[in-house]
Image (spheres, rainbow, N blue to C red):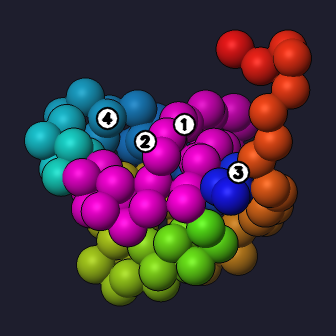
Amino acid sequence: MSVVVTAKLSADVGVVRKSSDERAEECQTIAGRARENGAVSHRFAVGDGFVLVNDERESVAAFENFFGDPEAMAFIGSVGADLNVVPETTVGESIDSPDTF
């Protein structure tokens, strides 16, 4: 059973966008580490002062292992997230439904 995790992090959206362009290789390296730690899929969205993370993970433990890694958190902070603000996180069991695409 996989889980879907959404996290809303306070962030400097300008830095997030710029980092996505200028630090693409580092982002891909972190994505590889996330896959090694049970990531099935990953996507970002940005809004006014925040970034939304939408991940599918093999388990809650896989999510916690990745986001508990000090190196991963340091990188996330360096690309615009404000690590001084606790993110809003929601976890749910992924289910199949006829309207999934």
Q: Callout 4 environment at 10 Å: few (<14), some (14 to 19), or many (20+)?
A: some
Q: Residue 20 carries which label?
A: 4
Report how far apart the C-alphas of labels 1 and 4 lie in the structure. 10 Å
Horizontally, residue 50 falls left or right of residue 16, namely: right
Front-most of 34 and 69?
34
The part of the chain drawn in magenta is 30-58
Whichever of labels 4 and 3 marks the residue nearer the N terminus, that label is: 3
Whichever of labels 2 and 3 marks the residue nearer the N terminus, that label is: 3
Report how far apart the C-alphas of labels 1 and 3 lie in the structure. 13 Å
Q: In which quarter of the view is residue 45 placed?
A: top right
Residue 49 covered by magenta stretch: yes
Query: Image quadrant for the C terminus?
Result: top right
Q: Position of residue 56 (x, y in %)?
A: 59, 48
Q: Position of residue 80 (x, y in %)?
A: 44, 54
Horizontally, residue 84 falls left or right of residue 30, namely: right
Whichever of labels 2 and 1 marks the residue nearer the N terminus, that label is: 2
* Residue on which disc 1 sits: 44
Kindly check if marks 2 and 4 are in contact, taking CB atoms under 8 A apart as contact: yes
Name the amino acid type tagged 3: Val
Kindly check if marks 2 and 1 are in contact, taking CB atoms under 8 A apart as contact: yes
Q: Residue 4 carries which label?
A: 3
Report how far apart the C-alphas of labels 2 and 3 lie in the structure. 22 Å
Kindly check if marks 2 and 3 are in contact, taking CB atoms under 8 A apart as contact: no
Q: Is mark 2 on a helix, strand or loop?
A: helix
